[in-house]
Amino acid sequence: MGVQITELLPKKEAKLEDFGNKVVAVDAANHLYQFLTTIRSPDGSFFTDSHGNVTSHLIGLFTRTTHLMKLGIKPAYVFDGEMPKLKRLEMRRRAEAKEEAAEKYSAAEKKGDAEAMKKYAARSTRLTKEMIADAKEVIEALGLPVIQAPGEGEAQASHMVAKKDAYAIASQDADSLLFGATRLVRNLSIEGRRKQAGVLGYGKVEPELILLEEVLSSLGITQQQLICLAMLVGTDYNTGGIKGVGPKNALKMVKEHKTPENIFAAAEWSKHFSYPWQEVLELFEHPSQTDNYELKFHPVNTGKLSKILCEKHDFSGQRVEKQLEELGKSTAAKKQKGLGEFFA
């Protein structure tokens, strides 16, 4: 879900080419959910292989990642580790909502209601351990880093950006700013098209770059106050936030009361949540992160990729080969251009 404060954030229009030759830390779960939600058959059901295994996420992952690689972008995929206890509450709530959506999808399917099927299919999306394992295999075969976070993947990716090991984090959610990411790029996985709410249609969309320094300067608040603002609106650790408080009211409250103690006293936190606000603040200010990762990029293992996609999941060998051929030509052209510039 992510924190709903993007309407307050100053954004810069960007082009994919702007991220050429830069390492981008990708919030893997966020992107895989995007693919599962948007890449569906006309009735809203997943694409699957002959064994019934879901392949929608792999279709998106392979086509989108190779497109980014053709532009010289270096994606490094960061996967979630252990979930904080407070987030488990939110995940249970989401699981219940997905169960309800799945039941409504089944009912719509029996009635032959295609529009309702599309709507409830997107709401019932789940990312399973098997899907994650398949995704990791594809990423590694593409020669890209797979980084396992000790906790939240978004927190780990933000750490990599803050350390300047990566240029920006790619995610649709603004949570990374709360974790201290200096640059956030949105729409990297869906540039050129956006899923319309409740259906499987698309509209035009461009990448957006959000700079933490500009966010704090524009809003006139500190990093800690930004976290407090998000907590008032609602995060994955305190779903729903303070009832009746939207982003603009939250910003006003933060500026008026300034310190966390005063902000949450005024918001009457204890009337809305059974746990102290300090626990939520601590998760954002001191998340579980590690320096034990490598950002090494290797040549594409075409044989392994073909085995995973074509033999295991019934991808078209011709399409996969064409995509890899285009990637190879693009990579060779960039290397040649680099040599030309060097000897100029």
Image (cartoon, grey):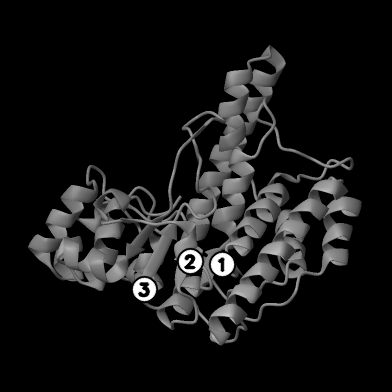
- Judged from the image, the secondary structure of the residue bearing numbered disc 2 is helix
Residues marked 2 and 1 touching at CB (< 8 Å) = yes
In primary-sequence order, the first of circles 2 and 3 is 2
Closer to the camera, 20 or 140?
20
In primary-sequence order, the first of circles 1 and 3 is 1
What amino acid is at disc 1? Answer: Ile
Is residue 185 depicted above or below 320 in this figure? below
Instruction: Report how many numbered discs are placed on residues in the image.
Output: 3
- Snapshot quadrant of residue 83: bottom right
The residues bearing labels 2 and 1 have C-alpha atoms spaced at a distance of: 6 Å
The residue at which mark 1 appears reads as 73
Closer to the camera, 105 or 15?
15
> x, y (%) of residue 264?
20, 62
Q: Is residue 261 left or right of residue 209?
A: left
- Snapshot quadrant of residue 274: bottom left
The residue at which mark 2 appears reads as 19
Front: mark 1 or 3: 1
* Residue at far top of view: 111
Residue drawn 58% across the image and 20% down it: 115
Residue drawn 18% across the image and 68% down it: 217
The residue at which mark 3 appears reads as 180
